[in-house]
Image: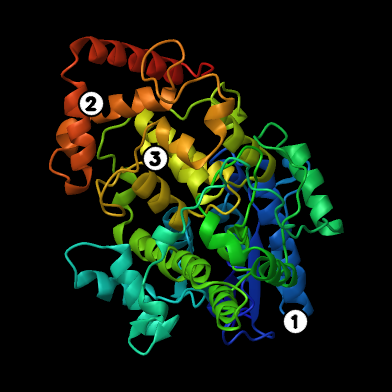
């Protein structure tokens, strides 16, 4: 009989100390398998800090597992690519299977349909059973989500969120929501006003240790042509650091998070946002700890209800919702393109080079930190891609490449679905489209921009405003019966009464789209 009973697969976004794949681990008969690999680093053109985050967190988790008595078979990328023993999961896993001869493979549900298929095919090619266990990291199991979804004609976040609040007894007063309202979103749209945000709370940063510095050197050597800046890398890469980052958010930024969660300002990187999504999505943090800490802050009077509810809705509501939807709709979901958009991602989304102040500022954050908060993602970068007509899956690939917290299960519904309306309304009932007026309302960008957000045509016309009206014009029939688009459709129909304006608009929009297709400067 083979010495090895289970070869336990631990993926780079499964760094949970209580991972279900480790249940019933027997140190005498089981081995943990982890692998850095070139394919996962290059199948999208990954931001350097994204690579550092994953590999550094994995290596720290390896040491943590070994310190707790687990035997870990770990494939580590080296600075010299010629020394690689394989390029992808299947090739590297096959080496371990051939040497260790396990009786079966064991893993926890993963976050990427492509990876799940690859690992299943590898197991089959070796004639091995692959046992897939539920991921306890999430509140809602995939079976529970399917049961909830199957009983409904449409999947609405607000309905799911209320169901989850009741099921988990979070911010509840009996069967009613704490404070009498389920949702305080209307209270969470403050702007910074004319004087700007003023002094902002410090965001806890973490100094790279020797393990992380080794990873940074390897990434710079092997992936030096990838986008983004490797410095400053200051994210948590261990469980203890992640918990410290959570405490820092709760203590210093949660109290004002609600009011200003949608606000934008030049050179504003994190504001009152948590910056915990990367640690959460790598399973360095448990979402229950995040929710419990936020609720405790409300109950002890440290943070107001609108801030706490807004944060809880993101973690207990939206995060769980998109994960369930992803696995329910895949693999066909990735091929959806309801508006038949075809343009490539603009060159400015890779290098930040543009005269558009809002895009330029958002991209400083992305290139420096692999981060942008949800309004920069949805209503600056996502908005421009949507109204321009960027292919929704290409936009998803860009998001996967550039954001440190991007895992397929969370990125695809957020980008292809919510941001780009590629799913035709499964995630959101209307496209998140707006003119430059929205940017002006929520930020100071337009005051420092050579374009005028009020103009749709002419030399100073704001590209977002131009493309917004063009977006409505070319998709009018798709939106005519959408009850949430009635106001915008009526406004477009008024614009269409001016034939000269529409001719100039279409010509200007056509030129902008040609420049995007040619990867020209905007």
For discs 2 and 1, the disc positioned in front in the rendered view: 2
Left/right placement of residue 219 relative to residue 411 reads right
Residue picked out by circle 3 = 393
Residue 190 point in image, percent of width and height: 50, 52
- Closest to the observer, 416 or 65: 416
Left/right placement of residue 247 relative to residue 179 reads right
- Closest to the observer, 199 or 426: 199
The residue positioned 22% from the left and 31% from the top of the image is 491
Residue 144 point in image, percent of width and height: 33, 77
- Name which of mark 2 and mark 1 comes first in the sequence: 1
For discs 2 and 3, the disc positioned in front in the rendered view: 2
C-beta proximity under 8 Å, tags 2 and 1: no
Q: CA distance from mark 3 to mark 1?
A: 41 Å
Q: Is residue 75 visible?
A: no
Residue picked out by circle 1 = 68
Q: Is residue 286 visible?
A: yes
Residue 398 point in image, percent of width and height: 50, 39
Q: CA distance from mark 2 to mark 3?
A: 23 Å
Mark 1 is surrounded, within 10 Å at the Cα level, by few (under 14), some (14 to 19) or many (20 or more) other residues, namely few
Residue picked out by circle 2 = 473
Quadrant of res 301: bottom right
Q: Is residue 364 above or below residue 14?
A: above
- Name which of mark 3 and mark 1 comes first in the sequence: 1
The residue positioned 55% from the left and 32% from the top of the image is 445
Quadrant containing the N terminus is bottom right
Left/right placement of residue 470 relative to residue 86 reads left
């Amino acid at each position: 009989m083979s010495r090895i009973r289970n070869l336990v697969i631990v993926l780079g976004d499964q760094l949970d100390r209580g991972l279900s794949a480790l249940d019933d681990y027997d140190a005498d008969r089981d081995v943990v398998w982890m692998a850095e690999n070139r394919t996962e680093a290059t199948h999208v053109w990954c931001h350097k800090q994204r690579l550092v985050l994953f590999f550094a967190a994995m290596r720290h988790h390896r040491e943590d597992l070994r310190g707790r008595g687990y035997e870990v078979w770990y494939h580590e990328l080296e600075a010299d690519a010629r020394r690689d023993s394989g390029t992808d999961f299947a090739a590297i896993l096959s080496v371990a299977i051939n040497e260790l001869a396990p009786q079966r493979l064991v893993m926890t549900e993963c976050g990427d349909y492509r990876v799940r298929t690859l690992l299943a095919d590898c197991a089959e090619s070796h004639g091995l059973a692959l046992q897939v266990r539920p991921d306890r990291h999430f509140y809602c199991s995939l079976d529970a989500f399917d049961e909830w979804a199957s009983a409904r004609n449409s999947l609405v976040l607000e309905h799911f969120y209320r169901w989850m609040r009741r099921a988990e007894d979070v911010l509840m007063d009996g069967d009613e929501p704490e404070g009498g309202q389920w949702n305080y979103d209307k209270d969470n749209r403050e702007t910074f006003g004319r004087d700007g945000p003023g002094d902002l709370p410090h965001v806890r940063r973490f100094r790279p240790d020797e393990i992380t510095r080794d990873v940074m050197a390897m990434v710079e050597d092997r992936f030096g042509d990838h986008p983004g800046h490797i410095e400053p890398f200051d994210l948590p890469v261990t469980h203890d650091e992640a918990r410290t980052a959570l405490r820092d958010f709760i203590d210093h930024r949660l109290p004002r998070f609600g009011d200003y969660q949608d606000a934008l300002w030049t050179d504003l990187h994190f504001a009152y946002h948590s910056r915990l999504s990367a640690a959460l999505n790598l399973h360095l943090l448990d979402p229950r700890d995040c929710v419990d800490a936020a609720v405790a802050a409300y109950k002890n009077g440290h943070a107001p209800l609108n801030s706490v509810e807004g944060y809880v809705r993101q973690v207990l509501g939206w995060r769980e919702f998109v994960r369930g939807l992803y696995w329910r709709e895949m693999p066909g979901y990735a091929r959806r393109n309801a508006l038949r958009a075809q343009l490539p991602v603009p060159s400015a989304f890779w290098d930040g080079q543009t005269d558009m102040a809002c895009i330029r500022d958002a991209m400083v954050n992305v290139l420096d930190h692999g981060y942008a908060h949800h309004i920069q993602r949805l209503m600056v970068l996502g908005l421009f891609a949507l109204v321009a007509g960027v292919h929704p899956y290409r936009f998803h690939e860009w998001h996967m490449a550039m954001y440190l917290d991007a895992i397929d299960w969370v990125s695809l519904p957020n980008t292809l679905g919510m941001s780009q309306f590629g799913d035709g309304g499964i995630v959101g009932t209307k496209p998140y489209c707006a003119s430059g007026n929205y940017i002006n309302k929520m930020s100071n960008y337009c005051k420092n921009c050579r374009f005028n957000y009020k103009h749709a045509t002419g030399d100073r016309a704001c590209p977002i405003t131009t493309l917004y009206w063009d977006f409505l014009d070319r998709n009018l029939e798709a939106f005519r019966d959408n009850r949430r688009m009635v106001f915008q459709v009526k406004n477009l129909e008024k614009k269409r009464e001016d034939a000269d304006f529409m001719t100039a608009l279409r010509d200007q929009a056509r030129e902008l789209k040609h420049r995007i297709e040619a990867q020209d400067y905007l």
